[in-house]
Image: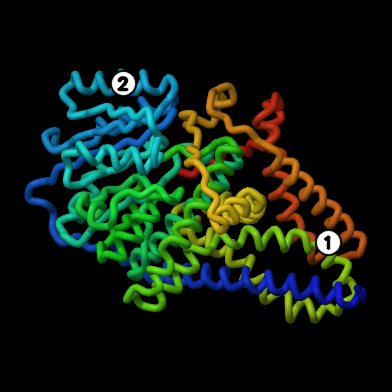
Amino acid sequence: MDQKIIELVIVVIYFAVLILLSIYGIHRYVMVHLFRKYRSRSPELKAPFVELPNITVQLPIYNEMYVVERLIDAVCHIDYPADKFEVQVLDDSTDETVKLAEMTVAKYAQQGFDIHYLHRADRTGFKAGALEEGLKTAKGELLAIFDADFVPKPDCLRKLVDFFTDPLVGCAQMRWSHINGDYNLLTRLQTIMLDGHFVVEQTTRNRTGGFFNFNGTAGIWRRRAIALSGGWQHDTLTEDTDLSFRAQLMGWKFVYLLDEEAPAEIPVEINAFKAQQRRWAKGVMQVGIKLYPRIWRAPLPLRVKLEMFFRLTGNISYPLMIVASFLQFPLLLVRYNQPFYHLMILDLPLLFFSSISVFLFYGTAVWYLDERRTPRMLHLPLVMGLGIGLAFSNARAVMEALLGIKSDFVRTPKYSVEQTSDETWKVKKYKRKRGLLPLLELSFSVYFLLAIVYAARLHMWGTIPFLSLFFFGFGYMGMMSILQTTNGKRLLSLWRPVVVDRR
């Protein structure tokens, strides 16, 4: 094939990918704009309950020996009338968690708590199946859900329950906060990523009349809303998102409390983080395939339908990033002799929409939550690199969803890591195997290192910061995946940054 044609094909594919990523970047700009416009529009409480309703707190767990006691202890210290407060420990565990959970439940039952231990030997439906099973015997007209990594505050139910005086409210949820957000570099970057979702996306969707998705925990459901919306279903890996959208298609209203937080532990180990992100990416894509045709046909405003399209297809950016990664070195060769004004006219506008929007999006969340913002703002380039590093893992998840390939619900291991000095998790159970993916990630890191060296030799300095994001993202993912599943634990501590007091 003629060299000119090859070069043209490379450039056309590159700009096609960049344009698609830019479209999703524009969506992030819109979200930031709407957040700034509506962030002060808090949910309105019609009236408090004269008599509080019965609430059943459901705790779905699976092999959580390190955190199950912490979870049950916190839930049993929630401030709510004892005669209207029931706790269900929905345990699918197959290890020591069974005995620990039974003993803890028995302890609180002896103290007079209305608490029940329900164990399933068959994990049909995974978390959705456990919640559905619990519904058969639950006493409450309202159902609060907390995952094993959460430590709910004593006043959490009181903060949420009065919104259910409105008979159309089907679900109410708090923002997640992070117990161990300062533990290491990975948790620092995760914190910023999660805050972007919970501050900007969730607030904007809920306060502009869009579709809001319950995040699986730290919230209350109306039992009737679950039943009339088709119940918990387990044909996707994100049963919470699936039920949320089905409920809102039925007309139920959702409430989101941005300024009330529910503390949770986030993964300190890279392979657990990747597994969690992969499950979320695949599950959301599955929900899109399942529900978007119904959403498009529903009598909803066009802006809601369009926003839902971006919400449900956003993970397609990961396969696109892989294509963009492959093209970086050929682009250095093809575009070396192009005049500078081409870069200014073509590349910069697209990079502005596709890349700078990421900084603005996450920076807005940091700015809203933190008084001492500078240290976290300096992490924003690394957040973008971490997102790039997820490309191979999440792209696989997206392709599996598109091809209809089913997979089990993979839980995220929790180790009860709360203090920055706690390294006991390194010798605990539940670590995930790394597979061959880290080798692919490291090979791409080397690929980008060579591209950086080549760009420097050609004095193409403007490309080096962009290439460095790819080098860091793939290198960090691959190296940490290997170190955290081998004996290189001393090397691991080298990646931990100096702790910054965020109070």
x and y percentages locating residue 358 in the rendered image: 58, 62
Q: Give the Cα distance between marks 2 and 1.
A: 58 Å
Q: Could you say whether the residue bearing mark 1 is in a helix, strand or loop?
A: helix
Q: Residues within 10 Å of mark 1 (few under 14, many from 20)?
A: some
Residue beneath disc 1: 329
Image quadrant in which you'd find residue 340: bottom right
Query: For the point 70% across and 58% down, which residue is it?
Result: 322
Horizontal side of 377 relative to 345 (left or right) equals left
Q: Nearer the viewer, residue 51 or 250?
A: 250
Three-letter amino acid code at the position of disc 1: Phe
- Looking at the image, do the residues carrying marks 2 and 1 touch, with CB atoms under 8 Å apart? no
Judging by the rendered image, the residue that carries numbered circle 2 is 102
In the image, 212: left or right of 353? left
In the rendered image, residue 232, in percent from the top left (x then y), is placed at 32, 48
Residue 496 image position (x, y, % from top left):
63, 36
Q: Is residue 199 visible?
A: yes
Q: Earlier in the sequence, mark 2 or mark 1?
A: 2
Which amino acid is tagged 2? Glu
| Vertical placement of residue 272 versus 12, above or below | above
Secondary structure beneath label 2: helix
Q: For the C terminus, which image quadrant?
A: top left
The residue depicted at 63 percent of the width and 39 percent of the height is: 497
Q: Quadrant of residue 271?
A: top right
